[in-house]
Image (cartoon, rainbow, N blue to C red):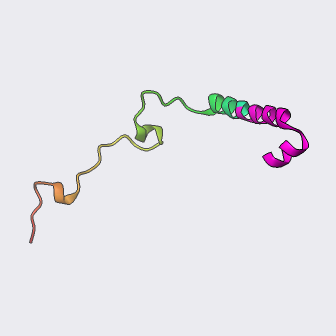
Amino acid sequence: MIPFALRDRGIGPTMLAAAGLTALGWLICVLMAEETKGMSLAAAAGGKETIPAAAPENQSNTTTV
């Protein structure tokens, strides 16, 4: 769309429209996004905050046949 807007409207109005869309996106993010400062990545992603289990080859109490 940008080439057509540049051709039909010019650079000034096209850049103002781009700035307006950027400002709208910023406003939506500020109003709707949850604050994640101080959260772990798992908690911020919506998962449970757990310690991952060790792989079987890393466990010392396993036996091989």
Judge from the rendering whether residue 52 lies leftward or rightward of residue 28; answer left or right.
left
Query: From this viewpoint, is residue 1 visible?
Result: no
Residue 11 lies within the magenta run: yes
Query: Foreground residue, 35 or 16?
Result: 16
User: Which residue is rendered at x = 76% and y = 36% of the image?
Assistant: 18
Residue 51 coordinates in the image, percent (x, y): 29, 43
Query: From this viewpoint, is residue 40 visible?
Result: yes
Residue 64 coordinates in the image, percent (x, y): 10, 68
Give the dominant element type of the magenta stretch: helix, strand or loop.
helix
Query: Foreground residue, 25 or 44?
Result: 25
Judge from the rendering whether residue 8 lies leftward or rightward of residue 34; answer left or right.
right
What is the magenta range? 1-22
Judge from the rendering whether residue 54 lies leftward or rightward of residue 37; answer left or right.
left
User: Which residue is rendered at x = 83% and y = 32% of the image?
Assistant: 12
Where residue 58 sits, quadrant-wise, is bottom left
Residue 32 coordinates in the image, percent (x, y): 63, 32
User: Which residue is rendered at x = 20% and y = 59% of the image?
Assistant: 56
Judge from the rendering whether residue 24 lies leftward or rightward of residue 50; answer left or right.
right
Where residue 5 sits, quadrant-wise, is top right
Residue 16 coordinates in the image, percent (x, y): 80, 31
Q: Quadrant of the C terminus?
A: bottom left
